[in-house]
Image: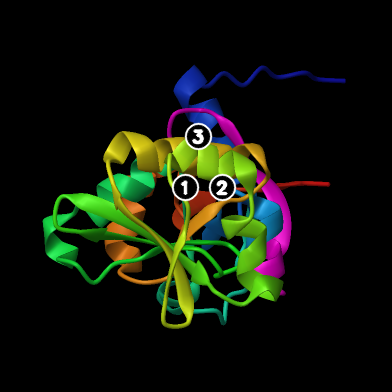
Amino acid sequence: MKLSNTWEREEDAYARFDEGQSQSRELVHIATGNILAAYEKLFAGRICTFTDENGNVMPGVILPRELDPQKVLDKTDVSLQPNQALDFLCDGETSYGCIVKTADRALRITKTGDTFQIAVPAAKSSGGQYYLNSAILKAAGQDFVKSGGDMYLRGLTRETTLAVMGELRNQGYGFVADNFRDIARKYAGAAQNIACETEEDSFAPGI
């Protein structure tokens, strides 16, 4: 039996190895942030984990191919922390037209001049949880005043408004912007992005 030795350069061997590998790559859009809320809003998609550009492993929801990510963004409320919410209300681009709301849409925060105001429905069934809430009244330093079909806290400083919002958060309320969403996302920060693009070889299933 005759044996023969065949030698090749190391880089050639790696090149042949790479050529022999089958690799599937696909550009996808992933909803990030509060993925449970994202999944509930989308009613579609696949929960996954992926690696971002900084090497961090993140959870997300892969959007279906047929779903237009811009249309999703246009219809998705932006979650805001209290400071982010007030910065959004003070943004010059929105003038006085932007509103921050609690997730149930019952409480509305707006900016008037140099101060803020909070409005809730006068109906006890929807607004009573706010205007009869002693902790909120203590944080505001005043009682709600009725005007038309709403109850108001007016002339609030930023510090007082943050105190009220902090108490609301302690009680489980969150804040969203359902208007000027593109500007609101600017204040929400990278961690609150609704969707991003990524190109990955594979995705590990999430739970």
Between disc 2 and disc 1, whose residue precedes?
2
Q: Which residues are magenta?
A: 39-59
Q: Nearer the viewer, residue 19 or 84?
A: 84
Image spot of residue 150 (x, y percent): 47, 75
Dot 2 falls on a residue whose secondary structure is: loop
| Position of 23 relative to 107 (above/below) | above
As for residue 44 lying within the magenta part, the answer is: yes
Position of 67 relative to 120 (above/below):
below
Q: Can see residue 9?
A: no
Residue placed under numbered mark 3 in the picture: 15
Residue carrying label 2: 33
Residue name at image x 44 percent, y 56 percent: 197
Which badge, 2 or 3, comes first in the chain's sequence?
Answer: 3
Residue at 49%, 37% (x, y): give it.
139
Is label 1 in a helix, a strand or a loop? Answer: helix
Q: Amino acid at mark 1?
A: Gln
**Depth check: 167 or 137 in front?**
137
Q: Residues within 10 Å of mark 2 (few under 14, many from 20)?
A: some
